[in-house]
Image: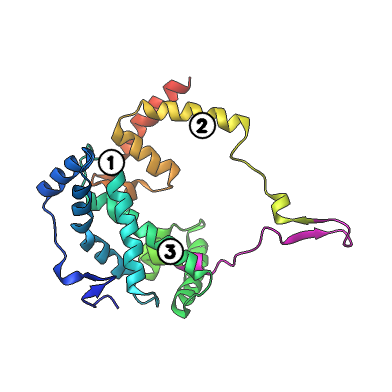
Amino acid sequence: MINRVEIANVNTSKLQVLTPEETKELFKKMHEGDKEAREKLINGNLRLVLSVIQRFCGRGENADDLFQVGCVGLIKAIDNFDTSLDIQLSTYGVPMIIGEVRRYLRDNNMVRVSRSVRDLAYKVLQAKEKLIREKGKEPTIEELAKELNVEKEEIVLSLDAIQDPISLQEPVYNNDGAESLSIMDQVKDKKNTDELWAENITMNEALKKLNDKERMIIDKRFFQGRTQMEVADEIGISQAQVSRLEKTALDHIRRLYK
């Protein structure tokens, strides 16, 4: 599937690769409003998209579709990349591209789940039960991936694929046909209470006081649910540095809350 020379009308054998110096200069021009520089950044990083979508081959998906979805993730990465941070675009861009592809596959899996993905999901559930018995606690995605010798993304995708969607209108209680309760009636809005509204304002103000790297680490750790090791891999620093920066940021936030 991925070995084709042309994907989504792009000749993959002729994709260019930008040097770090060229990338830096193009970002500078893009931030000054140069639209052509932005296009060059996108075209100069299409190999990144190609390398990512190869992880998702074998699922019966069309390569053209995966490539175009991956390009959406690349564009988001380029538009949101903070050049002041000491990390490469690829470090920031790969998770963005993977996330976009995973969302696409998850949405499509609601309609069609391949046999191999479903089989993997059941193996994951069996491995989960085994590790719970052995260690007495819920295993992490990393532990499941190591146990089954597969990528973490495949674990997440397989589990998502076997979750059956339900309608919010599905009744959960019916009083002899007179009045019924649906799932929607039972869903409580926990995001818009007065207490959370005030807390969010305070938190946003506190985050503004952090430096860029501290703010990014707090966002990935506590808003995106990443582990310290995952954050370290993504931004190109050690786990110990992530831990130290996280502690400094949290101490700063606590002082502002008092």
Q: Is residue 150 visible?
A: no
Q: Residue at x 44, y 30 (%)?
A: 204
**What residue is at 38 percent from the left and 48 percent from the top?**
227
Sort mark 1 into few (<14), some (14-19) or many (20+) by Cα contacts within 10 Å.
few
Secondary structure mainly formed by the magenta segment: loop
**Does 161 appear in magenta?**
yes
Report how far apart the C-alphas of labels 3 and 1 lie in the structure: 34 Å
Q: Is residue 203 left or right of residue 197?
A: left
Residue 94, position as x, y percentages in the image: 29, 56
| Residue designated by label 2 | 200
Of marks 3 and 1, which one's residue comes earlier in the chain? 3
- Do the residues bearing badges 2 and 1 touch, measured as CB atoms within 8 Å? no
The answer, for residue 74, to whether it is visible in the render is yes
Q: Amino acid at mark 1?
A: Ala
Q: Earlier in the sequence, mark 2 or mark 1?
A: 2
Instruction: Residue 140: give x, y in percent of width and height.
Output: 44, 57
Whether residue 10 sits left or right of residue 187 in the image: it is left
Residue 56 falls in image quadrant: bottom left
Q: Residues within 10 Å of mark 2 (few under 14, many from 20)?
A: few
Look at the numbered disc 3 and give the secondary structure of its residue: helix
Find residue 153 and name its label.
Answer: none
Find disc 3 in the rendering and name its residue: 104
Q: CA distance from mark 2 to mark 1?
A: 29 Å
> Relative to residue 61, is residue 216 depicted above or below?
above
Q: Which residues are magenta?
A: 158-180
Which residue is labeled 1 in the image? 240
